[in-house]
């Protein structure tokens, strides 16, 4: 039995479900245009192999580690870097085992939905992730990640992505986007403006960020008109 119900997310009422299936089939093969893709432009610029399974699925995913932390799993045990630079777990397999042992806590969440989808459709795994299957999962995913067809650009093409937007701050130098452009690779990865650091007064370093925004744009961010013009320039 696979991990996925083919009718997941469809309505329970038979007539509506049938219509949903029909509508889905008319679009499922179309190219993907993603206005908010959770991807790092550096992936596509360098096209290096993804790291181990834990570094790909657990350590950087705040939706996963915050949920597990809320249920008593220490962030350090999941390899999440500490703000004070203190020690955290670095062994990918140990991190993965802790993740697998607590995977049931993600039941009913969007994270569980997309993780199961990824495990089955990308890596061919059809047994539920648990403490008992942790090593099987880890070894299968690690073996796949070492192959050329699982590098970022290959997956971009395999998934049928026409265009994807990354989230980039107002102060970002966009060097990875420049590297993608200069590489000659035809994949379309575009920046999307995420100005949190210069619109939220509670953001750490907010005042300094405004000064930096002014330096980058040549606008006087000490005035309202100049502040708005700086946003226009960066956007």
Image: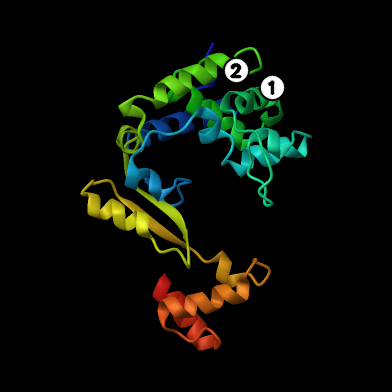
Can residue 227 be seen from the camera position used here?
A: yes
The residue that mark 2 highlights is 134
Sequence order check, earlier mark of 1 and 2: 1
Can residue 10 be seen from the camera position used here?
A: no
Task: Say which quarter of the image contains residue 8.
Answer: top right
How many neighbours does mark 2 have within 10 angstroms: few (below 14), some (14-19), or many (20 or more)? Answer: many
- The vertical placement of 6 against 164, above or below, is above
Task: Say which quarter of the image contains residue 105.
Answer: top right
Q: Quadrant of the N terminus?
A: top right
- Residue occupying image coordinates x 23% and y 49%: 183
- Residue occupying image coordinates x 64% and y 66%: 203
Residue 110 is situated, as x and y percent measured from the top left of the image, at 60, 37
- The vertical placement of 159 against 212, above or below, is above
In the image shown, does 163 or 172 lie closer to the viewer? 172
Q: Is residue 156 left or right of residue 126?
A: left
- Residue occupying image coordinates x 60% and y 31%: 112
Residue 46 is situated, as x and y percent measured from the top left of the image, at 33, 44
How far apart marks 1 and 2 lie (CA) works out to 8 Å
The residue that mark 1 highlights is 101
* Disc 1 + disc 2, Cβ < 8 Å: yes
Which structural element holds mark 1?
helix
- Which residue is most to the front? 86
Residue 128 is situated, as x and y percent measured from the top left of the image, at 59, 17
Residue 201 is situated, as x and y percent measured from the top left of the image, at 66, 72
């Amino acid at each position: 039995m696979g991990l996925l119900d083919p009718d997941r997310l469809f309505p329970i009422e038979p007539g509506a479900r049938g219509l949903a299936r029909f509508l889905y089939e008319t679009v499922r093969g179309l190219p993907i245009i993603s206005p908010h893709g959770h991807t790092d432009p550096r992936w596509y610029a360098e096209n290096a192999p993804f790291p181990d399974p834990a570094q790909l699925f657990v350590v950087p995913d705040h939706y996963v580690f915050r949920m597990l932390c809320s249920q008593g799993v220490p962030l350090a045990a999941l390899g999440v870097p500490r703000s004070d630079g203190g020690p955290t777990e670095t062994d990918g397999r140990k991190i993965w085992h802790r993740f697998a042992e607590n995977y049931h806590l993600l039941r009913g969440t969007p994270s569980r939905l997309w993780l199961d989808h990824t495990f089955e459709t990308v890596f061919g795994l059809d047994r539920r992730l648990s403490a008992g299957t942790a090593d099987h999962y880890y070894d299968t995913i690690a073996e796949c990640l070492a192959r050329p067809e699982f590098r970022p650009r290959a997956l971009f093409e395999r998934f049928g992505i026409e265009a994807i937007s990354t989230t980039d701050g107002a102060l970002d130098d966009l060097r990875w986007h420049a590297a993608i452009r200069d590489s000659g690779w035809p994949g379309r990865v575009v920046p999307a403006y995420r100005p949190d650091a210069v619109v939220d007064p509670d953001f750490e370093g907010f005042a300094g960020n405004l000064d930096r925004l002014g330096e980058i744009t040549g606008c006087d961010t000490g005035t309202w008109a100049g502040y708005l013009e700086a946003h226009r320039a960066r956007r």
